[in-house]
Amino acid sequence: MNSHYSANGLQHRKNRRSRPQQPAWVDLSDEELLNCRMCDLGLQIEGTALEERIARLHEELDTRGLRFRPHFWLSHEWFSPDGIPGVAIPFYLAHPRLARLERKQMLEVEGGTEDWCLKILRHEAGHAIDTAYRLHNRKQYRELFGRYTQPYPEHYYPKPYSRNYVLHLEPAYAQAHPAEDFAETFAVWLKPRSTWRASYEGWPVIKKLEYVADVMEEIRGAKPMVVSREHVEPLRKLRKTLGEHYSEKRDQYGMNLPNLYDQHLRKLFSDAPEHARGPSAAMFLRHHREELRKTVAYWTGEYRYTIDQVLGGMIERCRELNLRLSRPLEQAKNDALALVMVQTMNFLHGGHHRVRL
């Protein structure tokens, strides 16, 4: 027997055994995958990139001398439940195939990069540590951040460039609610090699950052007051299909409104033969996406994430309709701004707004 062949064959079998077994749904088409129930995905955090990123968070907490460790589980989205000092992580971050489906369904993957994921983990850890030590019951917390018990608004209208809040998750998320304000401030404080003292020098928000630093120093060796390890809405108990999940998620963001883009897109751009050699409308919108998102967020006060969903849908529809620019560049840019602004309001408030192009 050829010994070289045998050694290679043995090594191949070893590699095959050591390679983690992939779930049966990995090779399904999107349409087939959407029929799978969430509880049947069989996902876990262990052995994924999430495990490494949680370990990074633990190192950051350890560096700050904090003994508290939030617990984590997979669910349908990011959240830290009231009264539970833990963090739910969206299921799609536990497997690249599901991350691709998330991008296809929702146009982006929230927390999909290492940096983005760590930013969210720090934020959610802020919620968890707030709960664990009941920090929101403290008088100075209420004086600086506001009342934790006040209702969350359906929509909030941030004050652009306010210096009363830190800048961490977009868009001005610290302004959404006192609990978010604390979590965002904690995240900025926790970040390794954070330059918050220099970055926020002279800003009123420096008082919040100093308060967080002082409180963390106080509790660094203390045991948590709330120690529940409960998992709220864990993936293993979610019986809806992925298709049902994404239908509900798109409804939440207004993405299932009928005829949301086509009528106005055909007014702004063109699929007429005489414009067939013109610049692609999809490429035009993609090129100006960041500028349009920032401008609309400034004037409407809406979430940049929501605005980006509108833009993403417009870009995808322009590509599908093969639309082209049919008017001067500057005019097209101004008209696109007006259209994105109106479609954002339709997106959120039932489709009653109109625009003339």
Image: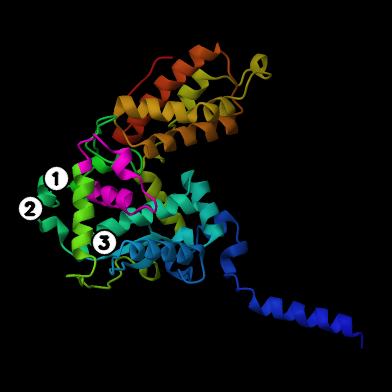
Disc with the residue nearer the chain's start (2 vs 1): 2
Quadrant into which the C terminus falls? top left
- Secondary structure found at label 3: helix
Camera-side mark, 1 or 3: 1
Amino acid of disc 2: Lys
The region drawn magenta spans 180-206
Marks 2/1: CA distance?
9 Å
Amino acid of disc 3: Ala
Residue 230 as seen in the image, left or right of residue 321: left
Query: Where residue 35 appears, x then y in whole percent?
Result: 50, 60
According to the picture, the residue beneath numbered tag 2 turns out to be 139
Disc with the residue nearer the chain's start (3 vs 2): 3
Amino acid of disc 1: Leu
Quadrant into which the N terminus falls? bottom right
Does 219 appear in magenta? no
According to the picture, the residue beneath numbered tag 1 turns out to be 144
Say the numbered circle drawn on residue 128: 3
- Asked whether disc 2 touches disc 1, contact meaning CB atoms under 8 Å apart, the reply is no
Camera-side mark, 3 or 2: 2
Q: Residues within 10 Å of mark 2 (few under 14, many from 20)?
A: few
- Secondary structure found at label 1: helix
Q: Residues within 10 Å of mark 1 (few under 14, many from 20)?
A: some
